[in-house]
Image (spheres, rainbow, N blue to C red):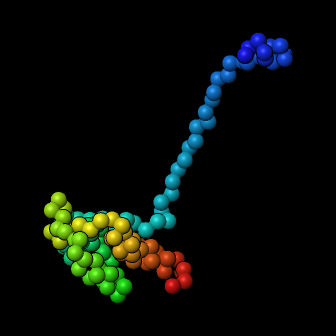
Amino acid sequence: MQELLQAAGISLQPRQVTFKRFNVTYDFSEFPPSPTRSVEMDPDDLCCFCDEILPKNPSAAFLKANKKLRALPEVRARNKSKNPSALYLPFPQRAEHCQLHQAELATIPDGINRGWPT
């Protein structure tokens, strides 16, 4: 290949690759603080499917979905959790439910505080 290139008046030159360094700083001050769990938390304040904190005043839609999911025949006790009320349900069946309580806890209140339409 070198010979073909040289015949055309071209040659390969060794090149050192240099990488520009990026200084990236993140500003998380705009985001609401993440709710933290305490070991002493009341199990009634945690989602039985994902052990995340539930909103203080969940919506009627959330309460209805929670009741419906708990009644499914596939629901089993989750023994490896520190939450005594923990239940197992395959992720595809509980994903929307857990997204809803996460939105009601953080996303929706944050949007209301920022003046987003409700």
Task: Please state the total of marks drawn on the protein image.
Answer: 0
> Does residue 78 appear anywhere in the picture?
yes
Residue drawn at x 37%, y 85% is 61
- Left or right of residue 4, residue 97 in this image: left
The image shows residue 75 at horizontal and vertical percentages of 22, 71
Q: Quadrant of the N terminus?
A: top right
Q: Indicate the quadrant where residue 40 lies.
A: bottom left
The image shows residue 83 at horizontal and vertical percentages of 18, 67
The residue furthest front is: 73
- Left or right of residue 58, residue 9 in this image: right
Residue drawn at x 27%, y 72% is 47
The image shows residue 113 at horizontal and vertical percentages of 48, 78
Residue drawn at x 51%, y 85% is 118
Depth order, front residue of 53/114: 53
The image shows residue 51 at horizontal and vertical percentages of 26, 67
The residue furthest right is: 8
